[in-house]
Amino acid sequence: MFDRRPILLIIGFLLSILALGMLIPALVDFMYGNPDWLVFLISSALTLFIGVLLILSSRSGQLKFSLRQAFLMTTASWIVLPGFAALPFVLADPNMGYTDAFFEAMSGITTTGSTVMTGLDLMPPGILLWRGLLQWLGGIGIIIMALTVLPMLRVGGMQMFRVEAFEAQEKVVPRAASLASWLAGIYVGLTLAWAVMLAVFGGLPALDATVHAMTTIATGGYSTKDASVGHFRSAVVDWIIVAGMIVGSIPFLLYFQTVRGRPLALIRDTQVQWFVGTVVVGVAAVTWWLWQDGGMSPLEALRYAAFNTTSVMTGTGYATADYWQWGGVVGGAPVAVLFCLMFVGGCAGSTSCGIKVFRFQILGAMAAIQLRRLLQPNGVFIPYYNKKPIQEGVAEAVMAFFFMYALSVAFLTILLGLTGLDHVTALSGAATAISNVGPGLGDVIGPAGNFATLPDTAKWLLAGGMLLGRLELFTVLVLFVPRFWRD
Amino acid sequence: MFDRRPILLIIGFLLSILALGMLIPALVDFMYGNPDWLVFLISSALTLFIGVLLILSSRSGQLKFSLRQAFLMTTASWIVLPGFAALPFVLADPNMGYTDAFFEAMSGITTTGSTVMTGLDLMPPGILLWRGLLQWLGGIGIIIMALTVLPMLRVGGMQMFRVEAFEAQEKVVPRAASLASWLAGIYVGLTLAWAVMLAVFGGLPALDATVHAMTTIATGGYSTKDASVGHFRSAVVDWIIVAGMIVGSIPFLLYFQTVRGRPLALIRDTQVQWFVGTVVVGVAAVTWWLWQDGGMSPLEALRYAAFNTTSVMTGTGYATADYWQWGGVVGGAPVAVLFCLMFVGGCAGSTSCGIKVFRFQILGAMAAIQLRRLLQPNGVFIPYYNKKPIQEGVAEAVMAFFFMYALSVAFLTILLGLTGLDHVTALSGAATAISNVGPGLGDVIGPAGNFATLPDTAKWLLAGGMLLGRLELFTVLVLFVPRFWRD
Ligand SMILES: [K+]
Ligand SMILES: [K+]
């Protein structure tokens, strides 16, 4: 069997970072005079202890990863981390079992945002901050991963986004570290900017502004209010968050290039163009229906359409309306559009999830070539992405990804149905988990509902779905290939 | 522009055959003393007149098809034929507009089986026979097409099913004609066998037995009763039809090989194995739920599960229960399983539609290769189908087909939503039309519902969806490529 020490070493490091993160809500709760500060301190100590133990016991191992080690490390760390991140939930809330706590933590760290918690409005600041922090850490985690580990693993066509600075040669490590620091800096900067905007222009209290800024840029969707962003009844807040969700769904590498004086990279990227174009078309269509058939004024229609459409497509999952109910007023079209957009998601290399825009571009290019090939069976056609020929193996990987995505949603739907969920809850639950969106459809888990009432088995299944979607399916699925474990 | 005379010539021939077909219900209605015989006679005369006119006016053209002519001929004939097949519906029923009549005819000829008619139990025999006959003709039409035109057009990987006898060389025309006659003979023989079984063992009256035999082997699903096969309340009838639906979903070429003394071809075909395997697993699962949670006796559960699961998966669309309501009793799992199976369909070269089993085999093979390639990035993996390496271009064609299938369902769902349908009706309507199944989900178009109440626009959209699905998407889509019409 291959050496597992480098894996345990990395997990040890990540747990230590998580433990440090727990000190922030501890500090805030202490400042607010809330007794929960002890909960966070205990959780932090426990997590740090295990983390340091892992580091010390694995130190002798090399920090060089084989492919299999990288796969196992990635999936294992995204299971172990929520396992510990769940501790404060269990300790702080006497009514919360470990299943609920793990669900909430996995939903946080994968930036899904499905919640089992109610009564958020009355919760102490520490726990609200911890939920936001989890999504925020998960967001930067996936950005770094999408540039470092995933291209190396070549899952679902991610090798297209290989960055030279991260190539697996030891001499570029300083450059990789520098790029990662830049990205983290941009991430922090954007979050701060949105927190300030929400506080100053939106009039939100510091805690609400901070948490919403974090879960907006992370396209996570955890709110500090049961009624989500709808609670604030503010057009200004809505529009600031719309802009933030879009910012969070664009490849962060392009921001780095912009900062480094190449702003054209951002504008010329076809994935960004298609993403923004789809958002604009989706918002325009939904606005039209809400205005013409839904009886809203044009401005009101635009505001609600922009917020909820962007929220669903970027997979953020905030709500300012129970948008699935729009169908009852104006027919099934907006519901169908939103349900489809839920699978699309944002751009690769951003915090958002779903199938992602670049895959649709490649699938579209392949379908177009098929159509042309029908007319010219002997013609030679080369598929393009972002004005460059698509490298070998990527198209097949993307198509296989699309098929496995559909299959995973179908399979998870059936499993959820087995736990007794009705078919609307089961299907939309599977879709919302794998696409890391947050709310599902229907009365139970819709934007106005909550995941608390689901059976425990369903919660574990959904947590599995979130992990699967966040790690681009194949990172997890490859562990089920018997060959993986063979020497 | 390319020569359209061969296209008109073929359509002229097909219309003449259709006109002859109309004489059968004319004769039956005349024998039963029903005045509708005149309706069929007039429709027949009109259709024959146009058919002969087309033949005479295009006679001078060559009967050799370019690729573009073949594409246009295929789609055009599947639009023109229902256009004339609709005549008896309009003339016989004073309440039926041309939209409804065209919908019913398209639904018939594509073997979809969605209906706008109610009061079937009291209808004259001619119209019932005409509906059955349309599906029956559509069934043999698609079998011949899947062996002749579609492999030549190479749509969605159908080139895999190229048969030497049909290769485009003139000297093999006699062999092609012989094979086509054999297949038609087998089709007639199977229909007769099932009609006799339904009459003798099932105790059905001659007309009911004939129509159900025709629409069973054609996996069409038009019944002579509003309550579909459930009307007969007979386990024997149910089981005879289950067997018939399975027989209709297996490649007819394999029956030909069996008749010619090679029965092993049928047993060894992996598409057949996977199809039968999926049916068995699906039926077993649904039986289990109906028995354990639905309160049925094991035998009763098996009967209802076998009938309705096979009906949905083969895309026949008969019902002996409002199966979508099973979810309310036993959770969403059976509904989810049935909804997924709806997309699967039967085997290529049979009368059934959907994505088809061979495409899932190829998609599965490609996904498995992706997983292995993740572990061995430099490995060379060759995908297999039916124990032979998959020929070049097929895998891409199949994957593009899968993507376009999903896209078509999504697009049609949105368009249907625009006509005011609720989202369940819109989604399941799009799926049932493109997969040529028949009933949708929900109160409106479910197995207990009817398509009559839908707006006219929705009916035209659904008819378009049926055509798209029946002709393997790309045959129709290629006509929308501007290059197709350019010289
Ligand atoms: K989310
Ligand atoms: K059917």
Image (cartoon, coloured by chain):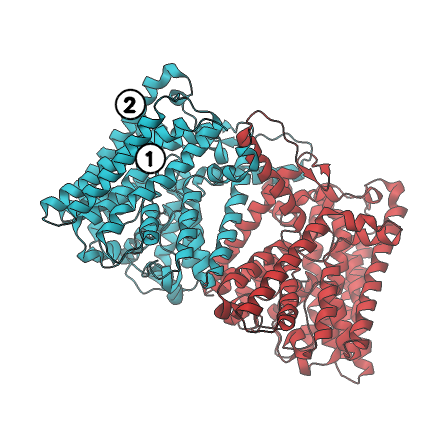
Chain colours: A cyan, B red
Residue A355: mark: none
Crowding near the residue tagged with mark 1, few <14, some 14–19, many ≥20 C-alpha atoms within 10 Å? some
Q: Quadrant of residue A354?
A: top left
Which quadrant: the N terminus of chain B?
A: top right
Q: Residue at x 29, y 29 (%)?
A: A183
Q: Chain of mark 2?
A: A
Circle 1 sits in a helix, a strand or a loop, which is it? helix
Q: On the picture, is A425 further left or further right than B241?
A: left
Sequence-wise, the earlier of marks 2 and 1 is: 1
Work out whether residue A58 or residue A258 is closer to the camera in this orientation and state it: A58
**Mark 1 highlights which residue?**
A141
The answer, for residue B148, to whether it is visible in the render is no
The answer, for residue B443, to whether it is visible in the render is yes
Crowding near the residue tagged with mark 2, few <14, some 14–19, many ≥20 C-alpha atoms within 10 Å? few
Does the residue at mark 2 contact the one at mark 1 (Cβ under 8 Å)? no
Q: Quadrant of residue A426?
A: bottom left
Q: Residue at x 48, y 27 (%)?
A: A2
Residue A261: mark: 2
